[in-house]
Image (spheres, rainbow, N blue to C red):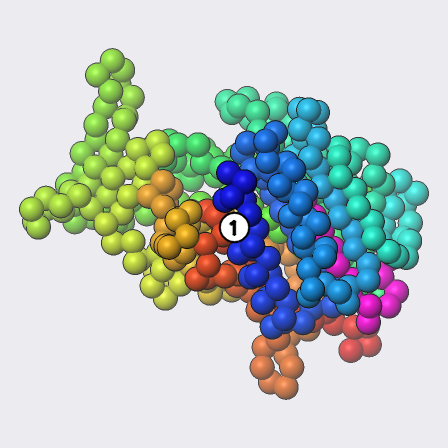
Amino acid sequence: MAHDCGRLTACLMSVFSQTVQSHKPRFIALHFQEVGGKDYMVNMGHAENFFCNIESNEEMRDFDRVCTYVDNHFKNVDSFTALGSMYFIHKSLKNIYQYDFNVKDFKAVSGQNKYVGSLDEVTTVEKEKFLKNFWPDFKWSRKGFMRTRWIIHNQGLDLVNVHLFHDASNLIACNASPSIYSDNRQKALRYVINRISDSSYTPLPFFLFGDFNFRLDTLSLVQNLSTSAVVQTVKKDSSNEVEKIICEQKDNDHKVLLHIETKIFAYLHQAVFTEDNGRAILKYDKEISAFHDVITEEDILFPPSYPYCEDYTKPTQYMNTRCPSWCDRILMSHTAQDIIHRRDEGASSVVYNTMGPNVCMGDHKPVFLSFALKTHGH
């Protein structure tokens, strides 16, 4: 595992450096989810090394202020979120302020500010884990959100790190449209938006970014992919529970077109997910549509960010475990979209894309948004 972690870290660092080099940002916000991975008790040390590696990276030498928040306190089961947020401020950027949620005022950011632990006593971050009673049917998980508040170029804004619930079973995801998992994510996201927009603090433009675990509307997609196929549902002998769904082509020697089990989603023509950046299936990405009243997003012009093959020789291939989906997103309030500077000399200055399309970095490809902020009076 240590070897794999080392290789993964090296790939991530390389891709991150290239992205910084090409876009030359002056403020960088990095949001991580599942810090330490699924086996976090073993791997938390590797994760902490990773954060140190980023800070000491050659590309970061001109960023003279750093704020790091890592919730690694896994023994505190009621509040552990495994979220990590890092913010880098370039030496050319003056007058950057951060909000103290305790004294309800902004303070100038200076030096290196590193908080690793439960973060409960840290007043410049607000962290919340979703309560168990939200979803009584689901086992406990490390999902939640973490917010920081800033003034950049005299513009106040919130940056919110988010991790929502995943699809536990492909079969259950096929039961209804929208799926029970989609409904749960919708509740959670609505809760986050309400929390950061409530009257506890003056509402500001906000960017929500992280792993939303948004999935394609599986039932509609499967119905579409299998229109010219014979669909067989295999049930367990003992119960009436569906064990697998097999879609076979009517001709062509009954070749299996689609095979679905709890943790298998194998589609014969995987190119549909990558050709033209998956444009043909983008219509099944519906989970954000319930939120158009409060949030928006730049156009998606990249293929689904999950689940990539973890074999280093196959960086563009998806695993046959889940239906490829745009899980990793950068969403924003309409007021946040209004403060993005759109054009430089006629060309769009906004880039929304995945990092390292041809590099293996685990099952998720990081997603980034690069833009210039409107300055007041601009």
Q: Amino acid at mark 1?
A: Arg
What secondary structure is found at the residue carrying circle 1? helix
User: Which residue extends farthest top?
Assistant: 238
User: Which residue extends farthest front?
Assistant: 3
Q: Is residue 138 above or below residue 59?
A: above
- Is residue 179 covered in magenta? no
Left or right, 239 with respect to 120, comes to left
Q: Which residue is mark 1?
A: 7
Residue 241 in the image: x percent, y percent? 29, 21
Q: How many marks?
A: 1
Residue pictured at 85% horizontal, 41% vertical: 123
Frontmost residue, 88 versus 225:
88
Q: Is residue 95 above or below residue 147?
A: below
What's the magenta region?
Answer: 84-97
Residue 285 visible in the displayed image? no
Residue 82 in the image: x percent, y percent? 64, 37
Residue pictured at 59% horizontal, 35% vertical: 43
